[in-house]
Amino acid sequence: MDKGVKRSLQQYAQVFQDGRQRGINEADTVMYLTKFFTDVLGYDLFSEITKEFQVRDRYCDIAVKIGGQVRFLVEAKAMPLPLADRHIEQAGNYASRSGIPWVVLTNGISWRLYHLTFDAGGIEHDLAFEVDLAPESDLEEAWRCLHLLSRESLVSEGLEDFWAHKKTLSPASLVKALFTEEVLNALRRDLHRKSEVRLELTDVAASLRRLLNPEVLTEDIKIRKARKKKKKSAKTEGQGDADGNDLQDPEEELADATDEGMAGPASNQDGPPAGNID
C-alpha cells in the first residue's frame, strides 16, 4: 500500500468515525460513500457511480459501473447504525431483480461484501469479506479487502479471481477433495507404512470425519470413486524409462501399494463425536 492510499484511508477512517459520533443520517452517509468511491477506489463520479439506482420498482443506494455495466450494488446504512444480517436480505432482493451477483453492505465504518447465487430455491448469500475502516483499524488489512472493490481490481478481474480462489479453498471444496479414493488411499498407505496396521478406507474416512468441524460436514459425505484409468494405447504399451524399466500408471501404482497386504477386516468405527481441532 503506497503512502497516498494510506493517507486517504486514514482521512476517511476519521471522517466516518466523526460522522458516526455526529449521528449523520443515511442520505449523508451515501454522499460520503460516493466521495470515497471516487477519491480512494478510483471511479468517475459522473459516469461510473449512480445514486438511487432503480431496480424495477425499487431503488438501491448506489450502483457502481464499468463500461456502462453495473458490477456491484451498494446498500448503505446510516453511520451510527450497526450492520445486521437482515440488511443483506433487502440488498439481495435488489440484486436478484437485476441479476447482479455482488452486493456491498456498509455504513462507512463496517464493510461487508456478499456474493449472491440465484436459483429456484431462493437467494444464497456468501460473505466474501468483512472488514472495518476506523482510526484504530489495521489499514493494511482494510485495503487488502477494499482494494477488491476498486476500479483497478474490477477492470483486471481481480475480484473474480479472488472469489474463484476463495471458493476453491472453501470448507465444502476441501471436504469433497479429502473424501476421494485417491486421497484416502494415500493416507491409508502412509499410515500402513508407519505402523503396519491394516486399515480399510472406511476406517480412514471415519477417523477423518471425527477430526473435522461438524459445520463443514452438513451433507452425508461419501467416498467418491476414483476415475477410471484410460486404456493404454499400443504406442505407450510397454514403454519404459531411460533405464529400460516399465513405467506404471501413477493411479495403478497407488492402488497396488494400498491393496498389497493392507486389506484387513474393518475395525470398530465408533468414536467420539465430531468436533474442532484443538
Image: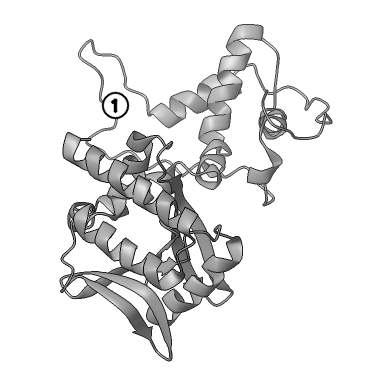
Q: Residue at x 39, y 53 (%)?
A: 16
User: For numbered disc 1, what is the local secondary structure?
Assistant: loop
Q: Position of residue 82 (x, y in %)?
A: 56, 57
| 88 versus 137 height, above or below | below
Q: Position of residue 42 (x, y in %)?
A: 18, 56
Q: Is residue 71 left or right of residue 29?
A: left
Residue situated in front as seen by the camera: 186 or 206: 206
Quarter of the rendering occupied by the C terminus: top right
**Residue to which mark 1 is pinned:** 238
| 261 versus 129 height, above or below | above
Q: Is residue 141 left or right of residue 268?
A: left
Residue situated in front as seen by the camera: 25 or 107: 25
> Is there any visible trace of residue 19 in the rendered image?
yes
> Is there any visible trace of residue 222 in the rendered image?
no
Label 1 environment density (alpha carbons within 10 Å; few <14, some 14–19, many ≥20): some
Q: Residue at x 57, y 19 (%)?
A: 189
Q: Amino acid at mark 1?
A: Gly
| 216 versus 107 height, above or below | above
Q: Is residue 184 left or right of residue 145?
A: right
Q: Position of residue 188 (x, y in %)?
A: 61, 22
Which image quadrant for residue 54?
A: bottom left
